[in-house]
Amino acid sequence: MVVILKKNPNEKQLENLKNWLRSLGLELHISSGANQTVLGLVGDTSVVDIDLIKALDIVEEVKRIQEPFKNANRKFHPRDTVIEVGEMKLGGGNFQFIAGPCSVETEEQICYVAQAVKDAGAGILRGGAFKPRTSPYSFQGLGAEGIRLLLEAKAKTGLPIITEIMDLHQLEYFDDVDIIQVGARNMQNFELLKELGKTDKPILLKRGLSSTIEELLMSAEYIMAGGNEKVILCERGIRTYETFTRNTLDISAVPILKKLSHLPVIVDPSHASGISWLVEPLAMAAVAAGADGLIIEVHNDPARALSDGAQSLTPDQFDQVAKRVFQIGKAFGRKVD
Ligand code: PEP
Ligand code: MN
C-alpha cells in the first residue's frame, strides 16, 4: 500500500501518521521528491483502514499495491534509484558502460583490457573470477587470485570493479570489490540473495535463463528486504526455441522493468547473443529502449579466450561500439560521461 501526501504536509500531522502506521506493525519506506512524498507500507496492510487515512488533511491518495514486490516497486519509490560508486553514477539518466573479459586470466590480460576499455569510455571493469561453467571440465576461473588481479587493474586504472559471486562462502573475498554480480544461474539462490541483502555493496542481479520479469523483481526484493536497496537489474537474454543465438534478448524487458521499478536496468548483449557481431546492434537497441547501461565482454585475444571468446569484442571493436552507443545515448538525453 502507498500513501501519497499532499505538497508540504504539516510536520506534526505527518509524524502522527507515521507513528500510527508503525504502531500497526508496518514498516515505512519514505520517498521524498520535489513534488511528492510517498509512504510505502510493508507488512500486513489488511489492518489499515484506507478511509481513515484518506480522510486526513495531509493525504492526497491511498493505493493498494497489487504486485508482490514492494521495495523494488516504482509506486513505492517514484524517482529513479541512482547507484554511486566513487565518481561513477548509474541510473536516473546516468549511462554507464561496464566492460572487460568474461574471465580474468592473467595480470597482463586484465590490466591491458582494463586500460583499453577505460580509454574507450567504460566506467566500470568487469572480469569473472569465480566462473559458473556448464561443463566441470571447462576453465573454472582463478577464484580469489582473480579478484586480486582485478584489484591490481583497479589500482592501475582507477576503474571500479564488478565480479560474480557464486556461493555464500566466497563473500570473504569480496571486501574490496565495488559491485557484486549475481549471475543468471544464481538469480533464485535465495540464501545468497538474503546474505547480499545484509551488505551495503551494489548488487548486479542478472535475469535467470528461464525467469519471468516478475521473478527477477522478486529476487531483487529478497536483497532489498534485507536492507540493501542498491540493486541493478540486468537483462541478459532468456531461453527460447531460437537456436541461432545463445539466448534471446528480451528487449521489451527494459521498458517494462523501468516502468515497474525504480532500479537501474542494464543490458548484456554479449550473453544475450553469444556472437560478437551481434553485440553492437543489440547494444544500440538496448540504449534506444531506455537501458541505463551495458555490460559487454571484451578480450585482448578473443580467439584464445578461456571462456566466451565467440561473443567477446576486441578492444578496437569495443571502442567502435562505445562511440556509436554514446551517440545514441546522447540523442536520447542520457548523461554519458
Ligand atoms: C558472465 O557475466 O560471464 C556470466 C556468466 O553471465 P550470465 O550469468 O548472464 O550467464
Ligand atoms: Mn561470460
Image (cartoon, rainbow, N blue to C red):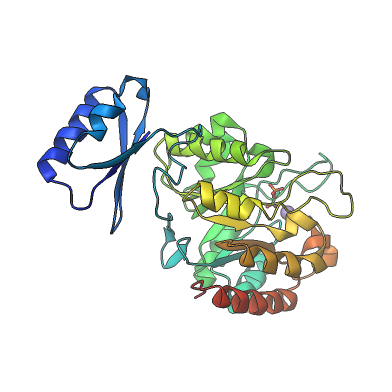
Along the viewing direction, whichever of 67 and 155 lies nearer the viewer: 67
286 to 29, vertically: above or below: below
Q: Camera-side residue: 117 or 215? A: 215
Residue occupying the far left of the picture: 12
Q: Residue 251: in sight, yes or no?
A: yes
The image position of residue 45, as x and y in percent, is: 36, 25
Residue 14 is left or right of residue 254, and the answer is left
Residue 46 horizontal/vertical position (percent): 37, 21
Q: Which quadrant holds residue 240?
A: top right
Quarter where residue 55 is shown: top left
Residue 167, placed above or below residue 109: above
Q: Is residue 242 left or right of residue 177?
A: right
Q: Please tell me which residue is depicted at 51% across the width and 71% down the height of the picture.
A: 334
Residue that lies at the very extreme toward the right in this rendered image: 244
Q: Is residue 20 above or below residue 329?
A: above
Left or right, residue 190 beside residue 9: right
Whether residue 147 is visible: no
Q: Is 270 or 261 nearer to us in this picture? A: 261
Q: Quadrant of residue 109?
A: bottom right
Rendered residue at 22%/52% (across/down): 7
Q: Residue at x 37, y 26 (%)?
A: 43
Q: From the viewer's perspective, is 304 left or right of 249?
A: right
Front residue of 161/262: it is 262
Task: Give the mark count.
Answer: 0
Q: Residue at x 45, y 64 (%)?
A: 89
Q: Quadrant of the N terminus?
A: top left
Instruction: Residue 123 in the image: state x and y as whole percent.
Output: 53, 68
Relative vertical location of residue 249 with respect to residue 52 in this rendering, above or below: below
